[in-house]
Amino acid sequence: MVTAAQASSLAFCGARFAMFGNMPISNRPKKIVRALAEIGFIMLLFYTNLLMGQFTHSHHAERGPGLIPAIYDVITPINALIGLVGAIIGYFVIEMFRRYL
């Protein structure tokens, strides 16, 4: 039979540590939010670069309104997949450098 002290001790241990190693639960959401923010920023840079290339390649910058067609050309599922894969790889490379340095 489990006493009240043992039950509270077990509950504390279960609430304090996550299933993934010894990382406290309170730090996991911070790391997840940080990873999502970094991946989102890399995606923003990727799409900004694509949009600028498409906008200047089509010479719409010289002829007037052409930003909306350039946006439609850039935002495609394949570009989203390429950007997401590149952003995740970039995130892991940056994390590796952080741990190394």
Image: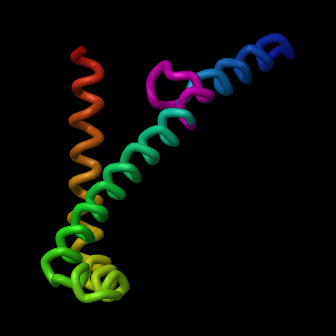
Residue nearer the viewer, 45 or 24:
45
Seen from the viewer's position, the closer of residues 90 and 60 is 60
* Residue at 72% over, 19% down: 12
Q: How did the renderer colour the structure?
A: rainbow
With respect to residue 74, does 49 lie above or below?
above
Quarter of the C terminus within the rendering: top left
Residue at horizontal 50 percent and vertical 22 percent from the top: 23
Query: Residue extending furthest left?
Result: 57
Quadrant of the rendering where the N terminus is positioned: top right
Q: Specify the farthest residue to the right.
A: 4
Residue 5 found in image quarter: top right
Q: What residue span does the magenta drawing correspond to?
A: 19-29
Q: Within the magenta stretch, is there residue 28?
A: yes
Q: Position of residue 60 (x, y in %)?
A: 23, 84
Q: Give me the residue at 22% from left, 17% from top.
A: 100
Q: Is residue 85 visible?
A: yes
The residue nearer to you, when weighing 8 against 83, is 83
Q: Main secondary structure of the magenta part?
A: loop
Residue 41 position (above or below residue 84): above
Q: Evaluate whether residue 1 shows in this view.
A: no
Q: x, y percentage for residue 82? A: 21, 64
Rendered location of residue 35, percent (x, y):
42, 41
Given residues 70 and 91, the one toward you in this image is 70
Residue drawn at the location 29% of the way across and 69% of the way down: 80
Q: Is residue 23 magenta?
A: yes
Image quadrant assignment for residue 66: bottom left
**Drawn side of residue 17 relative to residue 7, left or right:** left
| Image position, residue 61 (x, y; %) | 25, 79
Tally the marks: 0
